[in-house]
Image (cartoon, rainbow, N blue to C red):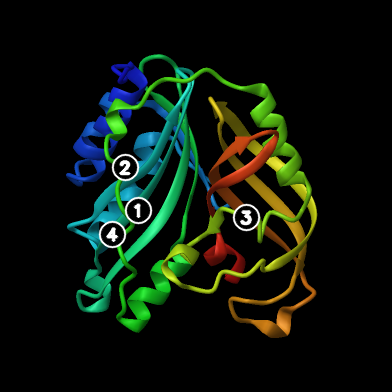
Amino acid sequence: MTSSHPFVHLMRRYVLDYLACGNTAVCPEIMEPDYLLYMGGHELGPRDEVYVPAVAQQMVQFPGLCMTPNDLICNGDRLALRFTQHGASTRHDGATGAWAGVGLYHWNGNKLTSNWALEDYYARRRQLKEGRCNNLEAPHVAPWDIPIETADKDAEQAALAWLNSGSMHGSAGVDFDDEWDGHACGPLIEVGETTVDDIFSAGNAVAFHVSQRGSYIGGIGKDERQGDSVVLRSSGIVRVAAGMVVGGRVVRDRGGLLA
């Protein structure tokens, strides 16, 4: 059966009425005044004073910004969306870029209240600088018609074990950043500690946001800083089978790490 769940309908408005149309006037209709976006170690909120002005800046840079859903899961209480944002930058003579993102949304049964999110601004920066746009990943065929699946604590525990193992990178079936498009996306850090900021499941799919502390091992420049203690934030949606993570996508805050 397809979904007519109000949370999915709310996300449809978020993607189509708000972001795809570049219309921040929709925000009061879909977000609470104290809405918070957690991104890259920063809290962007409340809605009108901080969040909306920050988003408006991106909409000025990308006046025709598009947002394509690539994956969506929902258990009724929580929803995660993996997406691609893409458009032409007015700051780069019209150069185009397509970059991945993952958001883990909270709501109160009526409006959105917060979002743990990451976008691959490192890939965006590279594309705009080089003048070569990534390929656009295939969209989800029917994101607004997904089934609502109950949370699976066993799947969450399997994902937690994978996250805490410190060896996420190189897992079979899991792609990082824009690795799927042929770009090198190495492990970046030797993980010493993992903090799970948010995690939930919908059936065998698990969405997460983690902050990992460890030593920088190179891969995105500044090789003279190898060995420095750093924090790398990641967000993703993975699938679990037979107690193991068997596939999925992870977006890392490479831009924040580089900065």
Dot 2: within a 10 Å radius of its alpha carbon, few (fewer than 14), some, or many (20 or more) residues? Answer: some
Sequence-first disc among 3 and 4: 4
Three-letter code, disc 2 = His
Q: Earlier in the sequence, mark 2 or mark 1?
A: 1
Residue at point 30% right, 61% down?
A: 136
Q: Amino acid at mark 3?
A: Ala
SS of the residue under disc 1:
strand
On-image quarter of the C terminus: bottom right
Task: Estimate the spatial distance between the alpha carbons at disc 1 and disc 4, rounded to whole Å.
Answer: 6 Å
Q: Are marks 3 and 4 in contact (CB under 8 Å)?
A: no
| Among numbered discs 2 and 4, the one appearing first in the sequence | 4
- Out of 51 and 49, give the one closest to the viewer: 51
Residue behind mark 4: 86
Specify the label residue 84 is tagged with.
Answer: 1
Q: Residue furthest front?
A: 242
Whether residue 10 is visible to the viewer of this picture, yes or no, is yes
Residue at coordinates 65% horizontally, 45% vertically from top-left? Answer: 210
Tag of residue 172 = 3
Question: Compared to 146, does 160 lie above or below?
Answer: below
Q: Where does the N terminus fall, quadrant-wise?
A: top left
Q: Residue furthest right?
A: 192
Q: Farthest residue to the top: give it.
A: 109
Up the image or down, 15 lies above or below 190; here it is above
Viewer-nearest of discs 3 and 1: 3
Label drawn at residue 140: 2
Q: Is residue 134 above or below residue 46?
A: below
Instruction: Examine the image and state in which quarter residue 216 appears.
Output: bottom right
Q: Position of residue 82 (x, y in %)?
A: 42, 44
